[in-house]
Amino acid sequence: MEELHIKNKPCLRSTADLLSFFKRQMPLLRIFLIHLPVAFLTCYMFLAPPVMAQPWDVPYVPTPYDVVDQMLDLAEVGPGDYVIDLGSGDGRIVIGAILRGAYGHGIDIDPARIREAGSNAREAGLENRLLFIEGNIFDADISRASVITLYLLNSINMKLRPVLLNTLKPGSRVISHVFDMNEWMPDKVITADNDPVYLWIIPARVAGLWTWKTGQYVCSMNVQQEFQKIALKVSAGNTPLAVDNPFLSGERISFRATRPNSGEIFLYSGYVNEDKITGTVQIHHPDSQTVENWNATRK
């Protein structure tokens, strides 16, 4: 067979030669066609812009029934409560709350879980006392809840944390199975089925300067707050008082203050309602004791 040579490279000049050439290259062509799509998809997965994580990135693992009971016990769920379960799965937590006399609903992004939860509610004869909503937990209105229940992931809890603190009323309870809230320490922890269950009580916002009158003294209190932890600087007139046992749980606040020179002891206990505290103060003099109303205002 004659060949043409261009720059010392053979050039095939017949159709038969071209067909023979492509047959010899078929193994390489097959490899190219098979691996190119795989390579493209791999590059796309690593280089494509990230998509916002959805709550159903949390794998569905139902909470054991005995743990459900202990979660509801820890939150002291009962009549008068409204429970919202974020990521409600098959509905067992909400159903358990309803059986204790509470009201509530569940939210889940997975339609299959919503159907399953509805079926379970019907089997329990509770379909007219609760409901399950298909949706994103981050879009949900949770302001009506007195109890929030969670079995998500730590990363999801951390995204929810500011929503819980800014939306729920002081005194509302948050229960989480297994996963915590990092530096927001729980008010209580129990172990259920070898896993931790955490309880947080939404604290009132008390940071700032408060003033009131106790007996003959015009008093002031400067409060620094980190979640439910508070640090107080209290004065009666121009005299700083020694403060012991500052306590904040939900809307309840209390502390003990002592006037160093006279030995007077003041025991304050009250409830926070936005910019007002109402309660009582016991005044213990060395030779007498009395009780007065405590009415403080935040400036």
Image: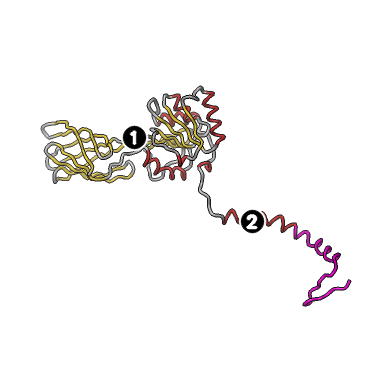
Q: Earlier in the sequence, mark 1 or mark 2?
A: 2
In-image side of 152 versus 143 (left or right): right
- Mark 2 residue type: Phe
Q: Quadrant of the N terminus?
A: bottom right
- Tag 1 residue: 171
**Extent of the magenta region:** 1-29
Mark 2 surroundings within 10 Å by alpha-carbon count, few (fewer than 14), some (14 through 19), many (20 or more): few
Query: Residue at position x 45%, y 26% from top?
Result: 98
Where residue 216 appears, as percent x and y from the top left, is: 11, 38
**Would residue 95 be counted in the magenta stretch?**
no
Question: Between 49 and 62, which is closer to the camera in this rendering?
Answer: 49
Q: Position of residue 96 (x, y in %)?
A: 46, 27
Q: Is residue 17 magenta?
A: yes
Residue 242 at x, y = what percent?
Answer: 19, 43
Up/down of 47 relative to 14, above or below: above
Relative to the observer, which residue lies in front, 154 or 27?
27
Question: Which residue lies most toward the right here?
Answer: 1
